[in-house]
Image (spheres, rainbow, N blue to C red):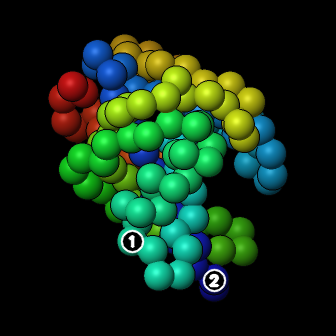
């Protein structure tokens, strides 16, 4: 089975987490942490910075690695590196997603997370959202 390696930004501000809703593809309308594919020769961190610039027109600061999620989907295996991030510059302009929300701890399960992102949310909930 083909492995797809991606990086995801868990952007936190004032105790709230930024979630995006996919606007395209097989998983359209599912909620996820923004990010994207790690290209050959890239580190997950470099890929994440590039993807957030492309998808959200925003510069981020990448902090600690929260977890790496492995998830089997029909047709591929996903390896998703998740990092705690903060906004350095930009306003999180949606270029590819159809919606976004800031979620606090109480409402973090109020959206329909994609399967791999469910594991990332669980890992985040085991820690204090700062």
The answer to whether 116 appears left or right of 15 in the picture is right
- Residue 8 in the image, given as x and y percentages of width and height: 46, 51
Residue topped by disc 2: 2
Q: Does residue 112 appear in this view?
A: no
The answer to whether 37 appears left or right of 82 in the picture is right
Q: Residues within 10 Å of mark 1 (few under 14, many from 20)?
A: few
Q: Residues within 10 Å of mark 2 (few under 14, many from 20)?
A: few
Classify 20 as above or below 102.
below
Q: Circle 2 — which element?
A: strand
Please name the residue shown 58% across and 37% down the image: 57
Please name the residue shown 46% across and 55% down the image: 48
- Residue 97 in the image, given as x and y percentages of width and height: 70, 36
Disc marking residue 43? 1
What is the quadrant of residue 69 in the picture? bottom left
Question: What whole-number distance in Å separates the C-alpha atoms at marks 1 and 2?
Answer: 19 Å
The answer to whether 63 appears left or right of 98 in the picture is left
């Amino acid at each position: 089975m083909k492995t797809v390696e991606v990086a995801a930004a868990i952007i936190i501000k004032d105790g709230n987490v930024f979630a995006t809703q996919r606007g395209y593809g097989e998983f359209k309308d599912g909620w996820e942490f923004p990010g994207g594919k790690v290209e050959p020769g890239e580190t997950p961190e470099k890929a994440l910075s590039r993807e957030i610039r492309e998808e959200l027109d925003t510069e981020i600061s990448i902090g600690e690695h929260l977890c790496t999620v492995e998830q089997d989907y029909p047709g591929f295996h996903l390896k998703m590196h998740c990092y705690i991030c903060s906004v350095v510059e930009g306003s999180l302009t949606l270029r590819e997603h159809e919606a976004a929300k800031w979620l606090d701890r109480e409402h973090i399960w109020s959206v329909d997370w994609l399967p791999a992102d469910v594991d990332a949310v669980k890992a985040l909930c085991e820690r204090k959202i700062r």
